[in-house]
Image: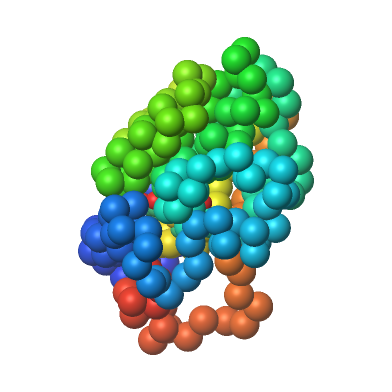
Amino acid sequence: MTDVIPVDEDQLRMEIQRHYAEVASSPDHEFHFHTGRDAARQVGYDESIIDDIPDDVIASFAGVANPFHFGLPGKGETVLDVGSGAGVDVIIAARAVGPEGRVIGVDMTPEMLDAARRNADRMGLDNVEFRKGLIERLPVDAESTDLVISNGVLNLMVNKHGAYKQVARALKPGGRFQIADICVDKPVSEKAKRNIDLWTG
Ligand SMILES: C[S@@+](CC[C@H](N)C(=O)[O-])C[C@H]1O[C@@H](n2cnc3c(N)ncnc32)[C@H](O)[C@@H]1O
């Protein structure tokens, strides 16, 4: 199966990085999507798993739903967050897997990676790691992961089929993929598909 690429992928990635660099460095700005603690509450995170996350740590959360709706990872599991942003889901997963487990976040935006590393340090977590990279070429070993999560990321990607293939490669046999994302129930017009602003917005 070949994906039809309606926009320039490199240009789209550049625009996305520009956008999310701002979410990382100036989370108090107004964006066209909700961010921070209010967004996490709105999309259904259990108050008990976010209430002790400090405001400045949760401020750059930019997820669209709750990937833990289907359950938290188990103790000792290895979790991969693709498009991990400022690392809020990584923090939640790291606390669930405990010291025997491990969580890896992958993101392409340097400012988000910096924020995520700062946030993990601030939370005193030493079972997490953030790697710079593209989901289309995930920098993780094959069959290394029990659970892959993603939050608000696949809708930003042209090559969704390639992303699913990479996730499947990263998962151990029997591993799980818990996706929080945006779905449309009407076909998107060709004109809209070619409009980069609609992809990043
Ligand atoms: C909407 S934000 C969500 C961040 C995080 N999951 C959260 O819930 O706060 C999307 C993130 O995905 C990253 N991203 C988008 N496309 C990517 C790609 N192709 N490869 C790696 N990261 C990507 C962006 O840099 C950004 O940090």
Q: Quadrant of the C terminus?
A: bottom left
| Lateral position of residue 124 relative to residue 101, left or right | left
Q: Position of residue 196 (x, y in %)?
A: 32, 74
Residue ID at (76%, 40%):
71
Q: Is residue 76 above or below residue 85?
A: above
| Lateral position of residue 111 relative to residue 123, left or right | left
Q: Is residue 185 above or below residue 107?
A: below
Residue ID at (35%, 41%):
115
Q: Residue furthest right?
A: 70
Viewer can see residue 14: yes
Q: Position of residue 73 (x, y in %)?
A: 69, 31
Q: Nearer the viewer, residue 115 or 131?
A: 115
| Lateral position of residue 177 relative to residue 8, left or right | right
Q: Position of residue 35 (x, y in %)?
A: 48, 61
Residue ID at (57%, 62%):
38
Q: Is residue 161 above or below residue 128?
A: below
Viewer can see residue 140: no
Q: Nearer the viewer, residue 24 or 74?
A: 24
